[in-house]
Image (cartoon, rainbow, N blue to C red):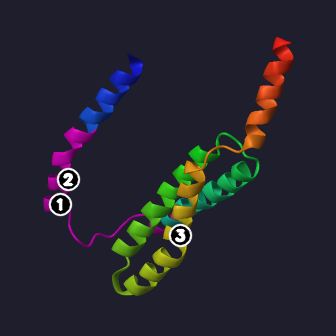
Amino acid sequence: MREDLVGRVLLAAGVALMPWLAVLWTTLPDPYPAQHWRVAWVGFDALEIAGLLTSAVLVRRSDHRAPLASIATAVLLLVDAWFDVMTAGRDVVFSLVLACTLELPLAILCAVAALRPPGVASVQPAVAQGVAVHV
């Protein structure tokens, strides 16, 4: 029941936001000076670093939380590539090179890690403990 409600709310929110795209497309100026540009980008890249490091540790440990960290990191990398290229201006070639050689391949690696079945090592201790308790 709860999952159905959450699913309906998310669906309604997604559909309700669709007209907002038209509003943004017609009202936002193309060039726009941004406040705190440096802080925004450095902070975003710091989140990517945290995601990559967290994913690395969890994947190496075959931790059951590794897919969550990996998929979140993949999303951050995809968003970074998108905004780097879309806001590049005259540096668009450099941004495309970075996106194609660094951000997108890392995002794919994270997605593959997230979709990989959990390691056997993380399952065995739980099974062994369960058997020991039931015996």
Please identify, in this view, whether the residue under mark 1 or under mark 3 is nearer the observer: 3
Count residues near mark 2 (Cα–Cα under 10 Å), then give few for <14, some for 14-19, many for 20+.
few
Q: Where's residue 3, x and y in %?
A: 40, 23
Q: Is residue 20 above or below residue 2?
A: below
Q: Where's residue 132, x and y in %?
A: 86, 19
Residue beneath label 2, please? 21
Residue beneath label 1, please? 25
Q: Is the N terminus in the top left, top right, bottom left or bottom right quadrant?
A: top left
Count residues near mark 3 (Cα–Cα under 10 Å), then give few for <14, some for 14-19, many for 20+.
some
Does the rendering let one see residue 117? Answer: yes
Residue extent of the magenta highlight: 14-39
Of residues 8 and 20, the one nearer the viewer is 8
Q: Is residue 128 above or below residue 56?
A: above
Q: Are marks 1 and 2 in contact (CB under 8 Å)?
A: yes
| Residue that sits furthest to the top in the current view | 135
Q: Is-magenta flag for residue 106?
A: no
Q: What SS does tag 3 mark?
A: helix
